[in-house]
Amino acid sequence: MERQEARRKVLLGAGAGAAHPDLPARRRRDLPHPDRCPSRRRQPDHRLGLAAAGGGAASTQLSAVTTPGRRPPALAGEIELTRLANGLEVCLVRSPQAPIVASAIFYRAGCRDEEPGAGGMAHFLEHLMFKGSARYGPGEIDRLTQSLGGSNNAFTSHDVTAYWFVFAADRWPEALAIEADRMRGLRLDPAEIDAERRVIVEEIAMYQDEPWDALELAVQAAHYGDFAYGRPILGTAAELAGQDRERIAGFHRRYCVPGNATLVIAGDLAADTLARVEEAFGDLRGEAPLRRPAGSPPLLGSLRRLVRRHGDVARLLLALPAPAPDDPAHGGLRLLATVLAEGRGSRLERRLVDEGELCLSVSASLSDHQLAAHFAIAAELVPGADPARVEAIVLEELRDLATRPLAEEELGRARQVFLADWAWGQERIHQQAVAAGLALAMFDLGQPERLLDAALAAGPQTLCALAATHLEPERGSVLGLSLPEA
């Protein structure tokens, strides 16, 4: 059940606490992964102080200072932000608890930037970035990564595409060479394009065959409609069939340029780290392109229901419209997700899993989309359990949050769990790099701090008002039910 719970958070967006390091798009493949079963541990309290950093390039530095009685900073490590002359945004996160370094590059190019009829292009390009550039042949990046004892991966979301590496501190510059070479251009061999197209078509079929994935895609499409976030990140088999070398190369030339990228280097950094970045990327050129219009957000209306038959147990997924992560209300809603379904003391966990024995698992989360979000509640039912009863309990708890302020004891527990989850989400160096990169690529470096402040400052009356405004099921929500096949 723990594995299912974690998987739901990946599918539906961030969990109750920190921005999840694996945005919705799946892990590319099973390479060594530095974040297997991380243990929770208490983090020291810190305070973020703002100071100007010296040096040639204009930069901003954020320092984490231990302060008793204060919460941890929203982003771990000592952060220095710089922009190179060619527009590349560079973020150095000094976090020397272990002799390792993670690098992550984010391109502001996701599913929402694809032309009509070219769905899945950003994800397709993500695959092809590992299939050959001027210096590295097909598969060589993975072989080199493993030979150096490192790990790598990539993800595509509706808003961004990202690639990250983790190496020992004396080997990490190889990641810079790889990323700079891929930014310069790809081989895009027609045989490799055709092979990866077949891989992704199989991936699409696999997700359609998996009950949770199929339900999520259906609810997402119904919830967002023609808005960019209603599109499947992988595209469709028909769309992929029309994507040839010329179109893929054009997408790469347009979006994989310094002015459209954020590079984060985190970990045990040497004094010459920025100089190494300038040496690797300084000769590259390219300004950020205008992003494609995302369309109009979904209109609010009454609760809509989708019913499917798939698998051998019933599943429920409720999606409610929610403000984007840079909205002041988003943090409080994250805390309400904790109240509802984070931990054994949470409301839905208690009523549906522990006491009611109606569900195998339940979760609540907010998506991380840049322009609009949704609040999701997911439940996998015990065989034979009544979906109508589960739905009634979920709606009952939403009404209760909107009409009765939380007791201080329940609110205190939720805040503790929220903070623990936030800290847990940045225990590993690659998580710290990804968290900083997501903030910079989609918002700004202060956005996580504002979100965390808003979540922890929300009191009982504020949370009650937020629930009444945003967690009303008749306010444009979509309820998806996946029932057992007959």
Image (cartoon, grey):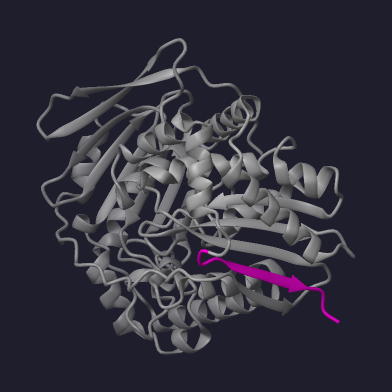
Q: Which residue is drawn at 28% across and 26% down?
A: 62
Left or right of 255, for residue 225? right
Left or right of 123, for residue 211? right
Q: Residue at x 60, y 30 (%)?
A: 411
Q: Which of 149 and 208 is in front in this view?
A: 208
Q: Residue at x 24, y 70 (%)?
A: 253
Residue 2 in view in this figure? yes
Left or right of 9, for residue 463? left
- Above/below status of 258 relative to 213: above
Q: Which of 468 and 454 is in front in this view?
A: 468
Residue 126 point in image, percent of width and height: 42, 66
Q: Which residue is drawn at 58% across and 21% down?
A: 42
Residue lying farthest to the top in this orientation:
68
The magenta stretch spans residue 481: yes
- Above/below status of 364 relative to 100: below
Q: In which quarter of the view is residue 35 placed? A: top right
Q: Which of 219 and 39 is in front in this view?
A: 219
Q: Give the range drawn in magenta.
A: 475-486
- Above/below status of 419 relative to 19: above
Residue 307 point in image, percent of width and height: 70, 77
The magenta stretch spans residue 280: no
Residue 4 in view in this figure? no
Residue 170 point in image, percent of width and height: 40, 33
Q: In which quarter of the view is residue 317 placed? A: bottom right
Residue lying farthest to the front in this orientation:
403
- Above/below status of 448 relative to 145: above
Residue 93 point in image, percent of width and height: 34, 32
Tell me the quadrant of the picture where the C terminus can be found: bottom right
